[in-house]
């Protein structure tokens, strides 16, 4: 019998690094480990390397791995000096200190130009705005920047032994706001204008290209952004729209053509297969549920029971869940609001239900925007930690009026990175066809309350934020 071919997928997210060992031929997960990252929106990237090394013992535990790849949190700014050391802590996607710079970049070039020529309209999440912030607030540090990487680029660079040339891929480069999705090239003029000079930028590899090998001889794939990794791990088909409820919320699909949205709600990213990944993201997602559970003094299991016991429309409560500011809509300084409070409806059950509905209405607005730009949603694929909630699953089907599929719990970003690694180690023209197990399917229940809840949410958001 032929020996098993093993690949590894690494997911370096906001909160942790996860590593999967996977059978390259079947997609079977052979082992999984995880190590946490420190909390915060600005961190020393060395923490990511320690989290990875603590699991792999410098890859000694992966000595049977033929290939590996890294999927990582998008947009983060890793600005290095000529010695390869950070000039400032890495600013993560959810750091909104560059909101002012994002506004100025939008005003300077015009939203329509950004959407048409680059594919995205700058918001505080994107790397370019963070470079502009560094140049304005710390010009002496900005002047020392020799190289700019993204989180997944930096880990790939470390895995390859800090070579002179660094690499990235289309999906992650498309989240910088200085790589043109439509033209497939860096807009060096934008980088120079933001930072004050042109640093070295990583070479953009194709989805099946090899970045090099580790010292142990494992092939290293190009890697990808986390959402592109999830799409690859899920094997999204035409008509599928993924809704991810993790630290952030994302709504995305793989499409053969790019989407151009001058409003900036939809980012016209690239995917990890050579196509495109139109995506709308929210800063607030699963933490809406966990924070409300903490307020109620219950664990998430009990929270889910409460949310299922509450009135379907939360008894008239409406939560605008912008607890950490928001990206979609672009309201970096917003705060959360609960409306409709009365003595009669202020119950734990209704509060829990309002958190679920607020989360889903926020994501539903993003889903509607995708539909307006021609991205059909025949089936919704619900993933992320928040998707484990039964209350969330059924309410999603009812609010969105569509079939909701819940894949079996898995680390889909890491699985997508592993699938990319297997592709890089082969001569095939497409990634391997790995099955995805479906854990549950929810059908809409013709809920009469759904239209009222969506309308109430839209009216409340307009009243509070004018959008």
Image (spheres, rainbow, N blue to C red):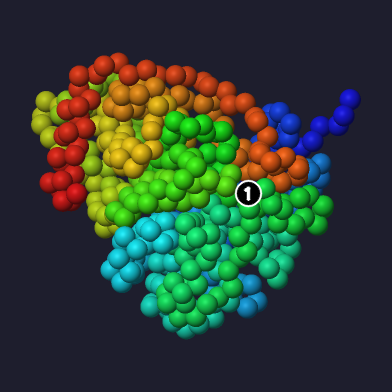
Q: Is residue 249 left or right of residue 230?
A: left
Which corner quadrant of the image does residue 25 belong to?
top right
The answer to which of 455 and 140 lies nearer the viewer is 455
**Which residue is drawn at the image coordinates 67% and 48% (left, top)?**
208
CA neighbours of label 1 inside 10 A, class few (<14), some (14 to 19), many (20+): many
The answer to which of 141 and 132 lies nearer the viewer is 132
User: Quick check: can you spot residue 413?
Assistant: no
Where disc 1 sits, the SS reads loop
Residue 254 placement (x, y as % from top left): 49, 40
Quarter of the image where the N terminus is located:
top right
**Which residue is drawn at the image coordinates 42% and 77% (left, top)?**
193
The answer to which of 304 and 241 lies nearer the viewer is 241
Which corner quadrant of the image does residue 23 belong to?
top right
Placement of 195 over or under 297, stated as above or below: below
**Which residue is drawn at the image coordinates 28% and 68% (left, top)?**
107
Residue 174 placement (x, y as % from top left): 49, 56
Q: Is residue 211 left or right of residue 104?
A: right
Q: Is residue 68 left or right of residue 382?
A: right
**Which residue is drawn at the image coordinates 52% and 33% (left, top)?**
236
Q: Is residue 215 left or right of residue 17?
A: right
User: Quick check: can you spot residue 32?
Assistant: yes
- Count of numbered tags: 1
């Amino acid at each position: 019998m032929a020996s098993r071919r093993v690949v590894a997928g690494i997911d370096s997210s906001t909160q942790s690094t996860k590593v999967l060992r996977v059978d390259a031929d079947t997609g079977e997960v052979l082992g999984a480990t995880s190590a946490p990252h420190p909390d915060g929106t600005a961190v020393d990237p060395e923490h990511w390397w320690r989290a990875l090394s603590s699991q792999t013992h410098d890859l000694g535990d992966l000595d049977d791995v033929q290939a590996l790849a890294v999927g990582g949190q998008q947009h983060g700014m890793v600005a290095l000096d000529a010695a390869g050391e950070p000039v400032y802590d890495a600013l993560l996607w959810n750091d909104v200190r560059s909101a002012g710079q994002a506004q100025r970049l939008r005003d300077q070039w015009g939203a329509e130009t950004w959407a048409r020529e680059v594919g995205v309209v700058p918001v505080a999440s994107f790397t370019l705005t963070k470079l502009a912030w560094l140049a304005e607030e710390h010009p002496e540090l900005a002047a020392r920047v020799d190289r700019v990487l993204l989180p997944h680029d930096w880990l790939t660079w470390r895995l390859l032994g800090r070579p002179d040339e660094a690499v990235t891929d289309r999906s992650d480069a498309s989240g910088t706001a200085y790589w043109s999705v439509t033209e497939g090239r860096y807009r060096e003029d934008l980088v120079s204008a933001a930072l004050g000079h042109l640093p070295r930028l990583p070479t953009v590899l194709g989805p099946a290209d090899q970045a090099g090998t580790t010292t142990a001889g494992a092939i290293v794939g190009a890697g990808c952004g986390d959402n592109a990794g999830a799409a690859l791990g899920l094997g999204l088909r035409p008509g599928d729209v993924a809704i991810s409820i993790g630290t952030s919320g994302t709504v995305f699909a793989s499409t053969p053509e790019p989407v151009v949205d001058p409003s900036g709600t939809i980012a016209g990213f690239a995917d990890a297969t050579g196509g495109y990944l139109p995506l709308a993201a929210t800063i607030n997602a699963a933490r809406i549920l966990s924070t409300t559970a903490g307020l109620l003094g219950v664990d998430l299991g009990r929270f889910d029971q409460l949310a299922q016991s509450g009135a379907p429309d939360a008894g008239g409560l409406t939560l605008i869940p912008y607890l950490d500011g928001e990206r979609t809509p672009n309201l970096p300084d917003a705060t959360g609001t609960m409306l409709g409070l009365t003595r009669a409806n202020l119950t734990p059950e209704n509060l829990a239900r309002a958190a679920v509905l607020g989360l889903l209405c926020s994501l539903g607005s993003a889903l509607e925007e995708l539909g307006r730009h021609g991205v059909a949603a025949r089936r919704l694929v619900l993933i992320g930690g928040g998707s484990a909630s039964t209350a969330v699953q059924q309410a999603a089907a009812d609010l969105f009026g569509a079939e909701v599929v819940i894949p079996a719990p898995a680390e889909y970003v890491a699985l997508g990175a592993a699938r990319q690694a297997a592709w890089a180690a082969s001569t095939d023209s497409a990634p391997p066809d790995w099955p995805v197990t479906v854990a549950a399917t929810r059908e809409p229940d013709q809920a009469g309350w759904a239209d009222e809840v969506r309308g109430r949410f839209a009216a409340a958001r307009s009243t509070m934020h004018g959008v």
